[in-house]
Image (spheres, helix red, strand yellow):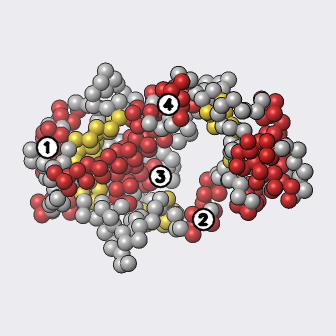
Amino acid sequence: MSQTTKGALGPYRVIDLTVEIGALSTMVLAGLGADVIRVEPPAGHPTRQRGPMLREDTTSSLYWAQMNAGKRSITLDLEDEADRERLRGLCETADFLFESDAPGNMPALGLGYEDVRGRAPQLIYVSITPFGQTGPKSMWAASDLIGHVSGGLSSLVGDPDRAPLRPSVEQAYNITALNAGSAAMIALHARHLTGRGQHVDVSMQAAMANTLGNARLYYEMDGIITERAGGARAFADRATRIIYPCADGYVAFVRVPASMIRLHKWMTAEGAEPRFDAERWASFAIAGNTLPTEDEIAELEAEIEQFFAAHGAQALYESGQHFNVMICPVNTMQDIVDSPQLNARAFLAEVDDPALGRLTVPGAPLKMSATPWRTRPAPIPGQHNLEVLQDRIQAQPIGD
């Protein structure tokens, strides 16, 4: 099948007015080929000042380079009516607008959905905020941390006898942004049917509450509040350990019934002489009345830990595949960079960044046979002012 250089979303134009909470959504759309136009204030977008920095200055943000890869940049002062009118005009040529201002801010500037829909009925207007456009907390400020705690995920992260935690990276922002991107694609499908755009209202709190999985279901069914389980997987009021130390790091292994017979065969093949009864452990249900005692679990986990401790993570990974046991190293960043699997799929790519020089950056999380992912550098401030603002009158949104 022949390929196109435009990408799957090549015909579509996106206006990006977001901060951290929405940056990933438009980055993914750019990777898929959309023409993403990052609108910055004349002094540059505030996240250009966000570290880590490649050099000892405030103009070499690696965060900016990653989260704005593939986008174009124009500078507009949205406090100035002339520039606001330029943005309204740009909306006439666009298919999507993503913004993350507090509810009411964009309408106050004459740039809300109702302000632009008359001139741009095709526009899909995506608002990404901590709590959504409506409700008693809609105007409340929030960070990624508040996204984790308000959505309930932090209540499940950490050790049971210590305070809740959040992941060390901004997953609330990223999960919310991916929800926004998905919602925009669904709205695009609706536009194919109706010929008109719509307002998409994305709440970070709701996006995070949708990640709680079984914890939410156990509460709805039985009123059980799932508690933190540290390096274990929680099931209602019980937990199954999933992280074990090994000779050179950690591995993930889930003690499910089917794996116990296979693990027993593996240990026997290596002369470990396992003491546990594989058939008995394989017969235990995950929930119900046929659960092992805490002493039995502790004895089994100590035996598994002893076996894993004698091997390196990669050796366990490879042997696990041979014996059909689901086990995997807990990869570090160095492991990711050196990963034969990721490198075989060309996950890491090199780009010539206009501000930072030659960079190795994360590439495509997916493969498309006819419309491949486009890995391109982030722009410098206002890099595309002339070609976007002067030529906008010739551009047209995609008709449906």
Q: Which mark is residue 216?
A: 4
- CA gap between label 4 and label 1 equals 39 Å
Q: Which mark is residue 62?
A: 3
Residue type at tag 4: Arg
The residue identified by callout 2 is 341
* In contact (CB < 8 Å): disc 4 and disc 2: no
Viewer-nearest residue: 223 or 51? 223
Kind of residue sitting beneath label 3: Leu
Q: Nearer the viewer, mark 4 or mark 3?
A: 4
Task: Characterize the local packing of mark 3: few (<14), some (14-19) or many (20 or more) Cα atoms within 10 angstroms.
Answer: many
- Of pointers 4 and 1, the one earlier in the residue sequence: 1
- Mark 1 or mark 2, which is nearer to you? 2
Find disc 1 in the rendering and name its residue: 116
As measured in the structure, the alpha-carbon distance from the residue carrying label 1 to the one carrying label 2 is 46 Å
Label 4 Cα neighbours within 10 Å, binned few <14 / some 14-19 / many ≥20 = some
The amino acid type found where label 1 is placed reads Val
- Residue depth check, mark 4 versus mark 2: number of the one nearer the observer: 4
Quarter of the image where the N terminus is located: bottom left
Callout 2, which amino acid? Gln
